[in-house]
Image (cartoon, rainbow, N blue to C red):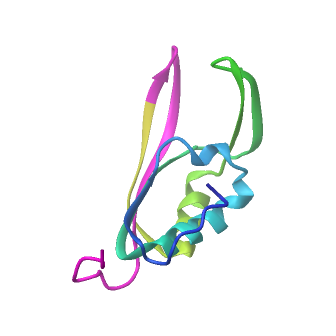
């Protein structure tokens, strides 16, 4: 996802569920800026982020495969989203049960700054 390119302001919304925590956190700021550029002014970004200060972690046997994890604390993640051009409208922590282990994620809903588009995009 960090290598994707799209035309500026080509989406009404972008979502990223349980995926961002699998890239190095030092790439978050650039990715958030890229996502903000893909969303038209007034558009939305909905995502789940890891919660906690985790520079990097690898679980060698997560559901049978190795898995990489990385995250920032809540305040840092929200600051990065704001710096990218999103106004965070909602940020809440939700805990899920993963095979008997309670895991908490940060759900964020951000709106790209700027005037919303008043007409549909050209087809």
Task: Identify the residue at the far front of this view.
Answer: 123
Where residue 85 sits: x, y (%)? 50, 76
Q: Measuring 49% from the left and 78% from the top, which residue is drawn there?
A: 8
- Tell me which corner region of the image, top left, top right, bottom left or bottom right, holds residue 109: bottom left
Where residue 74 sits: x, y (%)? 56, 53
Q: In screen coordinates, is 58 left or right of 9?
A: right
As drawn, 87 above or below 117: above
- Tell me which corner region of the image, top left, top right, bottom left or bottom right, holds residue 116: bottom left
Where residue 88 sits: x, y (%)? 42, 65
Q: In screen coordinates, is 67 left or right of 37?
A: right
Task: Identify the residue at the far left of this view.
Answer: 119
Q: Quadrant of the N terminus?
A: bottom right
- Tell me which corner region of the image, top left, top right, bottom left or bottom right, holds residue 19: top right
Q: Quadrant of the C terminus?
A: bottom left
As drawn, 67 above or below 32: above
Where residue 20 sits: x, y (%)? 59, 49
Q: Nearer the viewer, residue 10 or 89?
A: 10
Q: In screen coordinates, is 67 left or right of 93?
A: right
Q: Measuring 52% from the left and 15% from the top, which residue is drawn there?
A: 99
Q: Measuring 50% from the left and 40% from the top, which residue is drawn there?
A: 105
Q: Which region of the structure is painted magenta?
A: 96-123
Answer whether residue 120 is magenta in the image: yes
């Amino acid at each position: 996802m960090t290598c994707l390119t799209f035309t500026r302001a080509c989406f009404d919304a972008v979502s990223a569920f349980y995926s961002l925590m699998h890239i190095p956190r030092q790439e978050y700021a650039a990715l958030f800026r890229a996502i903000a550029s893909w969303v038209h002014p007034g558009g939305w970004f909905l995502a789940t982020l890891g919660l906690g200060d985790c520079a990097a972690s690898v679980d060698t046997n997560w559901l049978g495969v190795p898995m990489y994890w990385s995250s920032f604390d809540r305040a840092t993640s929200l600051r990065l989203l704001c710096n990218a051009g999103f106004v965070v409208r909602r940020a809440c922590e939700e805990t899920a049960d993963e095979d008997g282990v309670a895991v908490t994620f940060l759900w964020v809903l951000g709106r790209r700054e700027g005037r919303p588009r008043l007409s549909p995009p050209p087809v």
